Amino acid sequence: MLDFEIFSGSKKLVGLDIGSSSLKLAEVLSTSHGYVLNRFLQIPLPKGIIVEGILANPRDLSLKIKELFKDSGCRGRGVVTSLSGNSVIIKKVTFAQMDETELRDLIRDEAGKYLPFDNMDDVNYDFQILGDNDFNPNQMDVIIVAVKKDIVNSYLDAILAAGLNVTIMDVDSFALETMYEANYDFENNEIAVIVNIGASITNINVIKSGMSVFTRDFTLGGNSINEGLQDKYRITFEEAEKIKVEGLPGNDQDNMELRNSILDFAEPICSEIERSIDYFRSTFGGEYIKHVFLSGGSARIHGLAANLSQRLNVETEIINPFLKIGYNRRNVDAKALDSIKTVAAVALGLGLRKIGDK
């Protein structure tokens, strides 16, 4: 996994997923029987605090984070959180074979060749060596991640003001990868795609042999579907969010029309997902994709998985972050597991991180 920076903090880390419409907390414990979800809580985040991955209102975010930790009963102060969207640059680059120290110096000295930044002093960056290039054994494939320090610092300051300490700053797509590795078995060279449809941002992560080989974020998500439903049914944004997943109280005909409308409003998102998968296939030689997994609040939309499966010609299903992860029955309601599994995926991946991970 990739960290922009490692900060000092408690060894017991808590996953904090900061989305544009909600905050999620996941406390995961490592036991002799495997990983256990000890606590999970989600609270709504008012509009305007985070806009397209940029923190616009640090004070209000701090207050909501305080509320989240207080309501959850979580005493951990060490936090793993993440960034996504246009604020994060993720790029796969091929280099001549070299060690990590040489590579870090090279990326810094020649950053303009690989990253859209003029001055690397203003940027936090890290990388992971994926392995030998498939076509030239004298070269290696590397994923570089970079984000401007002022964006990172705005989140760090807000979380610090809430009385917490950021130990690891991750990326949403890689948090999903961590969650996937903890729950799913895969063969060597097997390719799976995780599509996380958030409120305003959709993350796509293509994983080969358990490692990210392609990522893309685009600024379309469930909010755009809600807005379409608002206009059509003359309802509030909150009402649209509810019926998007639960349907309308009424007869089957009403819900049939609603489902068709929802899929129509989801069409731009599906088109971008399809375009991204097509780009990956063309760039990576049309490699076979075994599974597509959906997560995020809009993943549970009726018919969405089937629609994407048909378009992509790949088996598509909702991801299950609790496939191999247990839960503490005293703190987590068993009846809620099914309803939270799509929205908990990123937070759970963050909660699985440990100091020293790479």
Image (spheres, helix red, strand yellow):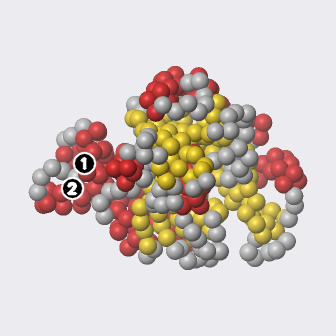
Q: Position of residue 224 (x, y in %)?
A: 36, 47
On screen, residue 174 above or below 280: above
Label at residue 243: 1
Q: Quadrant of residue 199?
A: top left
On screen, residue 64 above or below 172: above
Q: Are marks 2 and 1 in contact (CB under 8 Å)?
A: yes
- Residue drawn at x 35%, y 56% is 300
Q: Position of residue 309 (x, y in %)?
A: 40, 71
Left or right of residue 354, residue 22 in this image: left
Between the residue at mark 2 and the residue at mark 1, the CA separation in whole angstroms equals 9 Å
On screen, residue 56 above or below 95: above
| Mark 2 lies on residue | 258
Q: Earlier in the sequence, mark 2 or mark 1?
A: 1
Callout 1 secondary element: helix
Label at residue 28: none
The one of 134 and 67 positioned closer to us in this rendering: 67
